[in-house]
Image: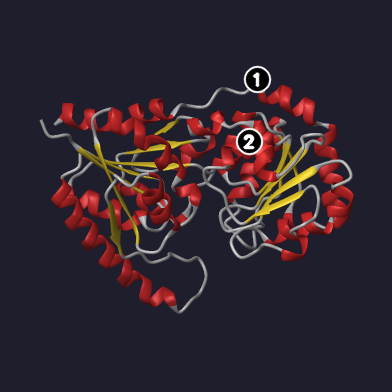
């Protein structure tokens, strides 16, 4: 008997792909053939084809939807239109039982095409308030899963369920010794991990590098600085290991970390919470974003899971003071983290997603 197909989509940043990466094995184990629709040159193509070479990757045209003026705002709608037609042809050919979207601009034409083809569409939203792509797509979805309960009231026209976070199983399988070996550390000092997201963060990079003389007195530092942001002058500095970006090594580096400094993307902060790593969050400012990271950080601060430093307040001394506060309060933070509700497993999330396909079949 032929296995049913299921289509996943999402891209633009690693955060819009990581959940899809987590559930692909579970969907396959449930008897589905997984296909992925993404853009031609987005980060999702490398992440999916690199991790799952057996999953067919279908490229479509994708335009960015901007909240600000740009000449590309006049041309990108045509790209989105082309993407809808391309996605529609793929969907009609594959006849999937379900389309699951993690968000990002490439997902919009896929969801529109899915609705046109009469295929059940399920969306996942990680942040407190929906991103622009998901906000546009939600009216065409059958169901929306959210991480935060505060997100549910934003969902219109579709059913919504708060599931909490989903954490990739491989993140729990890291080795501290392997992480220390990758970084070249002895393990005699606690380790501070600095992560600026898949594209890096100039603000975090400058803050940590300006404070290195002080920070290295008490900690070793693993710095994920983003592509093109390595500082060759610091290559041989003892106790400081910098990487542009890591994939398979991440679970080991997280296991080696005693503290983490990060932006406040939802996927990352829930991973730190699940791994019980005290965190200093520096969310993207409202000037550079729609404010979603500020809301994420505020909720984690209120729950006692994180120390928060606003981007506008970042300077050498304020950064050092915040890191010291993180170190001082780390045990209290870990105690509060241990009381948090455990995250969903990828298998549990896959079951919830597939239940929507079964529900449509039973009602039809």
Give SS at disc 2: helix
Q: Is residue 221 above or below residue 225?
A: above
Would you say residue 357 is visible in this rendering?
yes
Write down the quadrant of residue 181 in the picture.
top right
Q: Is residue 360 above or below residue 61?
A: above
Left-right relation of 191 to 38: right
Colour scheme shown: secondary structure
Residue density around tag 2, few if under 14, some if 14–19, many if 20 or more, within 10 Å = some
Classify the position of the C terminus by image quarter: top left
Q: Nearer the viewer, residue 41 or 54?
A: 54
Name the residue at 58% across, 42% down: 250
**Outermost residue, top side:** 339
Write down the quadrant of residue 20 in the picture.
top left
Q: Which residue is mark 2?
A: 178
Name the residue at 45% across, 79% down: 71
From the top left corner, tell me how far across and down residue 25 is, in percent. Answer: 35, 33
Residue density around tag 1, few if under 14, some if 14–19, many if 20 or more, within 10 Å = few
**Outermost residue, left side:** 1
For discs 1 and 2, the disc positioned in front in the rendered view: 2
Q: Earlier in the sequence, mark 1 or mark 2?
A: 2
Q: Nearer the viewer, residue 100 or 278?
A: 278
Q: Nearer the viewer, residue 222 or 147?
A: 222
Left-right relation of 267 to 59: right
Q: Which residue is mark 1?
A: 339
């Amino acid at each position: 008997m032929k296995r049913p197909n299921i289509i996943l989509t999402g891209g633009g940043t690693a955060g819009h792909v990581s959940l899809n990466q987590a559930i692909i094995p579970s969907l396959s184990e449930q008897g589905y053939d997984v296909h992925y629709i993404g853009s031609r040159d987005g980060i999702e193509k490398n992440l999916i084809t690199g991790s799952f070479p057996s999953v067919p990757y279908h490229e479509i045209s994708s335009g960015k939807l901007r909240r600000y003026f740009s000449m590309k705002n006049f041309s990108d709608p045509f790209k989105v239109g082309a993407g809808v037609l391309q996605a529609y042809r793929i969907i009609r050919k594959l006849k999937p039982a379900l389309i699951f979207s993690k968000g990002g601009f490439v997902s919009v034409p896929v969801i529109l095409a899915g609705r046109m083809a009469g295929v059940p569409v399920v969306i996942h939203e990680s942040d407190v308030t929906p991103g622009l792509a998901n906000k546009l797509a939600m009216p065409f979805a059958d169901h929306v899963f959210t991480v935060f309960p505060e997100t549910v009231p934003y969902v219109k026209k579709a059913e919504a369920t708060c599931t909490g976070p989903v954490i990739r199983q491989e993140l729990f399988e890291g080795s501290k010794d392997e992480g220390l070996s990758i970084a070249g550390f002895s393990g005699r000092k606690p380790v501070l991990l600095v992560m600026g997201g898949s594209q890096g963060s100039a603000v975090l990079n400058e803050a940590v590098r300006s404070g290195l003389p002080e920070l290295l007195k008490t900690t070793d530092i693993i710095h994920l600085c983003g592509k093109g942001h390595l500082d060759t002058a610091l290559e041989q500095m003892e106790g400081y290991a910098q990487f542009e970006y890591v994939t398979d090594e991440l679970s080991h580096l997280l296991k080696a970390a005693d503290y983490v400094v990060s932006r406040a993307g939802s996927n990352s902060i829930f991973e730190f919470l699940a791994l019980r790593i005290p965190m200093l969050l520096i969310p993207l400012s409202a000037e550079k974003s729609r404010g979603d990271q500020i809301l994420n950080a505020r909720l984690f601060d209120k729950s006692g899971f994180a120390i928060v430093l606003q981007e506008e307040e970042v300077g050498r001394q304020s950064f050092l003071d915040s890191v010291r506060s993180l170190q001082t309060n780390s045990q209290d933070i870990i105690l509060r983290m241990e009381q948090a509700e455990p995250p969903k497993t990828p298998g549990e999330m896959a079951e919830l997603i597939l239940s929507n396909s079964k529900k449509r079949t039973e009602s039809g």
